[in-house]
Amino acid sequence: MTIAVIDYGMGNLHSVAKALEHVGDERVTITRDARAIKGATRVVLPGQGAIRDCMGELERTQLKGLVNELLTDADKPLLGICVGQQMLMSHSEENGGVHCLDYLPGKVKRFDDTMTDNEGHRLKVPHMGWNRVDQHHMHPLWEGIATGERFYFVHSYFVSAENDAHVFGTTRYGHHQAHIATGRDAVFAVQFHPEKSAGVGLKLLENFVHWAP
């Protein structure tokens, strides 16, 4: 039983792997070997930085086709993290516009630089720090986690999914309602960093380790 963290050169790979090792007894491997990824029990798609670079590295390492194949496997759980969530959408506004994997219909949008809080103070972009996550639909990965718990974020862009059935969690930053947990079938993806979100983040990873779609 193996969890494969896909190594295409982008993402907080070792922190994610260490957190997964902490919550489960499956072997965790960081790899870009197609056979190892295909043979894994479950897969993590990380991402960090600009989405143009992430999509470019996925192409350069010849892993884009494999990831598309994994997304259609209803028996293999896949967890997307941070830009790994954004990459599942149709299109991103970042870098002048980038076509993504188009697994979930929707766009990735930038937070408005002129946003203010309730007291009129300018909100910073990127959105960095702890924020409340409201569970929009029930999902096995929310088991044992109360709605409204706080998770750790670092992002300037956020997902806006077209289909409400694909939205499992939201957070509000300024006037934006960001879809920060999305998915369908055996795929679940989050904008926040579970590996940096203390106990609630580890609980979500533990749920992923035991998830049987």
Image (tube, rainbow, N blue to C red):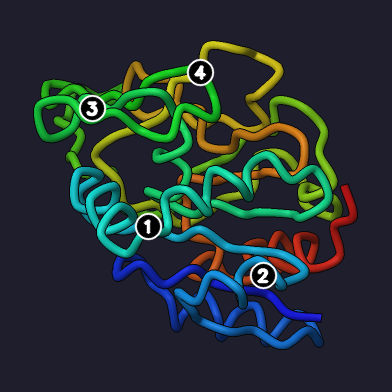
Q: Along the line of sight, which residue is nearer the eye, 211 or 1?
A: 1
Identify the residue position indicated by label 4 in the image. Answer: 105
Q: Secondary structure at mark 2?
A: helix
* Residue 213 drawn above or below residue 45: above
Q: CA distance from mark 3 to mark 1?
A: 17 Å
Q: Along the line of sight, which residue is nearer the eye, 122 or 111?
A: 111
Horizontal placement of 33 versus 185: left or right?
Answer: left
State yes or no: discs 1 and 4 in contact (Cβ < 8 Å): no
Q: CA distance from mark 1 to mark 4?
A: 19 Å
Q: Disc 3 or 2, which lies upstream in sequence? A: 3
Identify the residue position indicated by label 3 in the image. Answer: 110
Q: Disc 4 or 2, which lies upstream in sequence? A: 4
Q: Secondary structure at mark 4?
A: strand
Q: Which mark is residue 202?
A: 2
Q: CA distance from mark 1 to mark 2?
A: 18 Å
Identify the residue position indicated by label 1 in the image. Answer: 47
Q: CA distance from mark 4 to mark 3?
A: 17 Å
The amino acid type, in three-letter code, at marker 4 is: Pro
The residue sitting at 29% across, 46% down in the picture is: 155
Q: Quadrant of the N terminus?
A: bottom right
Q: Disc 1 or 2, which lies upstream in sequence? A: 1
* Residue 46 drawn above or below residue 9: above
Q: Disc 3 or 1, which lies upstream in sequence? A: 1
